[in-house]
Amino acid sequence: MSKKLIDGVNDVLSKALVLSATNRLTSLTNSGKQGFIDNAVASWNEAVDEIYSKSKVLRPDQGSEDTITLITGVREYDLPCDLIQIRWPLQDETNGRFIHDYKGGYEELRHLLVQPDNYTGQPTMGAISPVDSSLYIDMIPTSTENGDVYTYFYWKDTGLTRATDVFPFSDVVYRALVPVVAELWRGNAGQNRSDNIIKKNYGRAIRALKKEPGEEVWIKRRGSTIQTSPLGHDPYRA
């Protein structure tokens, strides 16, 4: 994991013929090429988000941990501003209690609490408010629950924005994504893009990210069975 965002922008703009091989950027600020650079940064973030979404692999820098502390009389609690998705349940590691996801969602939970102020005590369910992205729990803590600490894990926003930001995957994945990002860049610039190149190289990137080979293919040839490489060719032959 040695490639940085500035490398990715340079490689994509070179592939898009905006830069020559010897005319490399040293920063993400350039008055003459700022539109090209911003497009490349956005295209890289789009591609990185997509492969982690499709592969269902947790991005190395995506996970974080935080806590809420119950307060007497308080039902809603602020969550981190960089939170993308909370990972249920929340756990009181001291007392061995949990707050689980209310499957019906925020609106249904609100409707379930016909007289909200009457529901007090130990919370067991919660939902994320679509109004202000706070955590809404089913029970209002009393003095008995006051001070209980619940730990939770969440996925956070991990956009690449600085020239020195390192891509969170191997150089193999990086090489597979360069042609993808170049095609995304062309599409975002109003040029024709190749969806076939995008699809093929997304597949390469995801297989490399998951560190799994593609499915083995068996073919019949003149009465014999031949196992082909999961790469689609024999890597030891030209």
Image: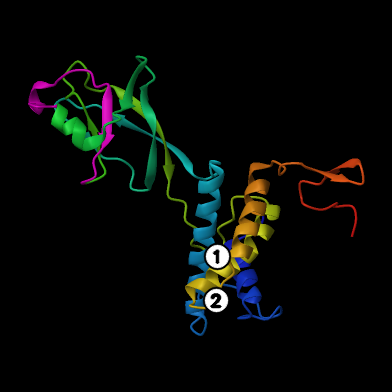
Q: Which of 32 and 182 is in front in this view?
A: 182
Asked if the magenta segment contains residue 182, the reply would be no
> Hey, which quadrant is residue 67 in on the image?
top left
Question: Furthest residue to the front?
Answer: 223
Q: Quadrant of residue 126?
A: top left
The location of residue 170, given as percent across then percent down, is 67, 51
Q: Evaluate whether residue 4 shows in this view.
A: yes
The magenta segment is 113-131
Q: Position of residue 200 (x, y in %)?
A: 65, 58
Q: Nearer the viewer, residue 172 or 80?
A: 172
Q: Name the quadrant of the C terminus.
A: bottom right
Q: Which residue is drawn at 37% across and 23% down?
A: 91
Residue drawn at (57%, 63%), measured in percent from left and top? 5
Above or below — where is 41 with respect to 95?
A: below
Is residue 28 visible in this depiction of the protein?
A: no
Lower sequence index among marks 2 and 1: 1
Relative image position of residue 111 (x, y in whole percent): 14, 32
- Where 104 falls versus 129 (above or below)? above
Residue pictured at 24% horizontal, 26% vertical: 70
The image shows residue 52, relative to residue 165, as above or below, that is above
Figure label count: 2
Picture coordinates of residue 59 (x, y %)?
A: 54, 44
| Residue density around tag 2, few if under 14, some if 14–19, many if 20 or more, within 10 Å | few
Q: Residue 2 carries which label?
A: none
| Residue type (three-letter) at the residue carrying disc 1 | Ala
Residues at marks 2 and 1, CA–CA distance in whole angstroms? 27 Å
Disc assigned to residue 192: 2
Q: Mark 1 points at which residue?
A: 163
- The verdict on residue 125 being magenta is yes
Amino acid type, label 2: Asn
Q: Callout 2: helix, strand or loop?
A: loop
Main secondary structure found in the magenta portion? loop
